[in-house]
Image (spheres, coloured by chain):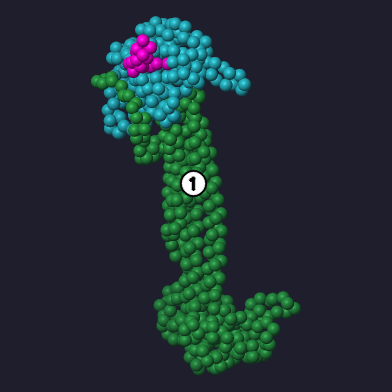
Chain colours: A green, B cyan
Amino acid sequence: MVSIAHNSASNPLSSQGISRLEIASMALDALWSNKLRSSLTMLGVIIGIGSVISLTSIGEGIQKSTEDSIRGLGTDVLQVMAGSAESGGISQGQGSVTTLTWEDAQAIEEQAPSATVVSAYLQQQAQIVYGENNTSTTVYGTDLAHPEARNTFPESGRFFNDEELAIASSVAVIAPTVQKNLFPNQANPIGESIRIQGEIYKVIGIMEVKGSQGPQDRDDAVYIPLTSMSARIIGNNSLMGVAVNGIYIKGEDESQLDTIRFQVENILRLRHGIISPEEDDFRITNQADILETLTTILGLLTTLIVAIAAISLVVGGIGIANIMLVSVVERTREIGIRKALGATERDVLSQFLAESIVISVIGGGIGIVLGVGVTFISATAFGFPFILSTTAIGAGVGLSTSVGLIAGVIPARNAAQLDPIVALRSD
Amino acid sequence: MERLYRNLWIISLITSMITLENITKTYHLADIEVPILRGIDLHIEASEYVSIMGASGSGKSTLMNIIGCLDRPTAGEYYLEGRELTTLDKNELAYIRNQQIGFVFQQFNLLPRATALENVMLPMVYAGIPKTERRIRAEAALTHVGLSDRITNRPSQLSGGQQQRVAIARALVNQPAILLADEPTGALDTQTSQDVMNLFHQLNEQQITVVIITHETEVAEQTKRRIRIQDGQIIA
């Protein structure tokens, strides 16, 4: 010891105190020395942040995929559906009575000046068989305008023609998923015969891939002439003509949809003999309306689920606060020693606050990784787009820091305000 | 004449290490007032080797807490190196403890998870001394107390005497004005106690002011000046 000369405390406020890095490393040391407890405490935050991140991202992904698939159906299309008939005031559900006919569609085409494409369709789930293979798919009976109305065209072969529609010919155009299921080893199934509910149909075309986003797989379908569908597969024609499930109507562009809607309403009311106060026996919907409704509902659902997840974060925060309180009591003597050696209240406060924040931030970091992982796995498994929600990650970082801060305040204040004499006497 | 006395008094404040003037401490238990210290006057000069003796309940621990800036007197004045301390706030007192007082406790009071070196570095952490300098000074302090080969040991791996020497190194590392030891040999056997007392003696020879609070006569006899306290008053 060279210099025994002592310091003299001339300016108490000149003490710089401890750097933040040092406080953080002290906190890490303290947490490391109690690994099991620290990691169990962290678990609350991990689960909380993980679920907030993954649920937000999954919600966004599903929303995006739903939007895409609805947009894929075309927002420039109006859809007229056979409405729910009412009997004694009780709605019997959509399509319970086929009030729409092919003739309605033809009338709209002739009489609605703004409607450029009109296409009626029948639709039914049916079993399709080819040799050993069979698959259940949606069979559409359509007219010739269908490809244009739905914006889906044959990739190879052709769609059925005027003559085939007129004579209810047994020809079918299959979509890619059906092709894959029925002809797994066959490159070109055109010309083959398949059975639709026992009826033999000849494959004349294969539709292009439209993608299978959302609930509806547009590639899982078979198209046959409306006349053939009506006569051979469904076989319950209304008195008014060939019953159909719905009619697609397209105009020049999206701005025409309101005009078309007005014209179609009038034509159908006239044809169906509906006078004003009576309720329509058809419904006209627009994909854009559906899109808006669905987006609202999904957004609401996501918010709700994330709110529930956030509760687990609060529980995690309470866990941290609890453990920190215990830790302060256990380390009363340590706090006394530190104070005797010159730690200020602020030093002790920072130390315990740092421990709480470090637990929470590490937990949050693991939670973010976990949340992103869960999102990625779910997106892959359920086929919706993997969206890394930056807001969710930002919120995760912010939330975990503030959870640690809030949870640590009371324990750290308790520690800081301990009387060093009392603290030194404890064991 | 009066003026001369006053000047002399001021000079004595400046030159003395510790000056206590009519220090009282009273605890309030419910409605009863319990006087612990009843007017202590005390001067300790720089480089003195002093023991404060008294039975338990005599008020010596309270006196030590006040000298060590862990507690404040109810009334009276306390000058440490000429500076009045009773008006200082908590942060300023923490700074005084850090810079001017080196504590040695009966139970050593080392942090159990930290190594000897880390324990000795602790006061310098709160002094805001850079890490590299901390290490150098802590190693020097441990060498000074004869523990240069034990710096990475934790308290549980050290004997009682070694732990107390780590505590003394820690007390010295910020070069304090006084070394304040509370029953420093109370938890040690006779031989180790003697080693520790020899160390105090040696430190005092190097001009360090040492104040030992004890109830053991054998300990007090080794110091150069003995102060006896009884019922909150200095009796000798």
Residue at image x 42%, y 12%? B42
User: Above or below — where is A235 with respect to A185?
Assistant: below
Q: Count of labels shown? A: 1
> Which is more toward the observer, A291 or B4?
B4
- Please say whether residue A97 is visible from this viewpoint: yes
Q: Find residue A206 and report its horizontal and vertical position in percent.
A: 45, 81
Quadrant (top left, top right, bottom left, bottom right) of the C terminus of chain B: top left
User: Above or below — where is A83 with respect to A314?
Assistant: below
Q: Which residue is mark 1?
A: A403
Principal SS element in the magenta part? helix
Instruction: Name which quarter of the figure residue A261 lies in.
Output: bottom right
Residue at image x 51%, y 81%? A77
User: Above or below — where is B167 with respect to A160?
Assistant: above
Packing grade of label 1 (10 A; few <14, some 14-19, many >=20) is: many
User: Above or below — where is A414 with respect to B203?
Assistant: below
* Residue type (three-letter) at the residue carrying disc 1: Val
Q: Find residue B142 and report its horizontal and vertical position in percent.
A: 31, 22
- Please say whether residue A190 is visible from this viewpoint: no
Residue at image x 66%, y 76%? A93
Tell me: A205 left or right of A8: right
State which chain disc 1 sits on.
Answer: A
Q: Find residue A361 and report its horizontal and vertical position in percent.
A: 43, 46
Residue B13 inside the magenta-drawn segment: yes
Please report the bounds of the magenta region as a residue range: B1-20
Residue A340 inside the magenta-drawn segment: no
> Which is more toward the observer, A346 or B146?
A346
Quadrant (top left, top right, bottom left, bottom right) of the N terminus of chain B: top left
Tell me: B207 left or right of A315: left
